[in-house]
Amino acid sequence: MKSAEHPEPLKVRSIFMSDIHLGTRGCQADRLLDFLRHHESDNLFLIGDIVDFWAMSRGIHWTPAQNTVVQKILRAARKGTQVIFVPGNHDEALREYVGITFGDIRLEHDYIHRTADGRRYLLLHGDEYDQVTRYHRWVAVIGDVAYNVLVRINGWLSRARRRLGISGYWSLAGYAKRKVKTAVSFIFDFEDSVIHGARERGVDGVICGHIHWASMREVDGLTYVNCGDWVDSCTAIVEHLDGRLELIEWRGHRSDALRAGRPAAPPTEIPELAENALAAIPDSPTLSAAIPQFLLRRPDAGNSGR
Ligand SMILES: [Mn+2]
């Protein structure tokens, strides 16, 4: 299916995606398919939490669109796109198979990619740098419930907006992440430790996922890149033919609003309901600790770390 605006897909060198969470209700497979139809790449890097085995053990939500995503990836691999899959914590069962190639898709624990301009990027999911998932699983569980409620409310809001004829997609979880201080400091802690880990590996940059918070910025000469997710923010990273990386927030078309280093544009309107819901969150240490878990859809149920 090709739109009138974009009769041909954009040719890029690489696509980097994480946190698709196939098998869950939250997975925005339709948007992802639309993104994939508009982009064609030599390399496709799947950086963890692609299939949510953890959620699927509780109940599978598998749609035709999710099937098509899998078929599209397999077909790309067959037709010569290099597909590398770095498992995350929600698909960590696949970590047992690193180094093995399945249907033209190679599994790796982590991977170093050299861009067209010669820069070396370390690709990893990132859960091993998340202290909450690693050491405080009970907190992660509380946050998981909160996150799911928020994503569900967001679905209702989106439908209401469509019915009222308001265009565009507004992310409640994204709004919460920007507003809630503990969430913000959680993001910073995660980013700091990933950056620290990447420096020790001597690379020029790191591309990760896990926290559902897309980002691209320079930190003392090292490029920190996070792919975001396809549950809430619908973001991916592309490497253009010249090696330049771009963060894309997919809204059904290419937009210049979200480019290197610049944060997502703030929502133009903030539903009162969201404001009130957030104001109602009590200021208790337990709940404050749980709030960062808005970021972690269905945290690790099994062993954490590698
Ligand atoms: Mn994860």
Image: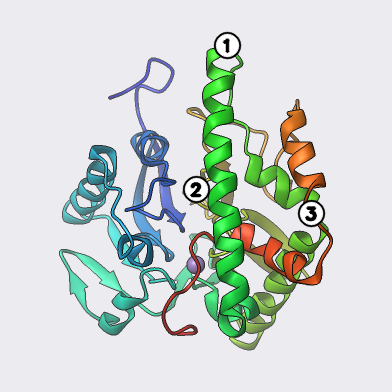
> Which dot, 1 or 2, sits closer to the camera?
1
x and y percent of residue 8 in the render? 35, 27
The amino acid type found where label 3 is placed reads Val
Where residue 240 is drawn, which disc sits there? 2
Q: CA distance from mark 3 to mark 2?
A: 34 Å
Q: Are marks 3 and 2 in contact (CB under 8 Å)?
A: no
The amino acid type found where label 1 is placed reads Gly
Q: Is residue 247 visible in the rendered structure shown here?
A: no
Q: CA distance from mark 1 to mark 2?
A: 35 Å
> Which dot, 3 or 2, sits closer to the camera?
3
41 vs 91: above or below: above
The amino acid type found where label 2 is placed reads His
Toward which corner of the image does residue 165 lie, by quadrant?
top right
Residue at horizontal 38 percent and vertical 33 percent from the top? 34
Disc 1 crowd rating (10 Å Cα; few below 14, some 14-19, many 20+) is few
Q: Label 3, on which residue?
A: 180
Q: Label 1, on which residue?
A: 165
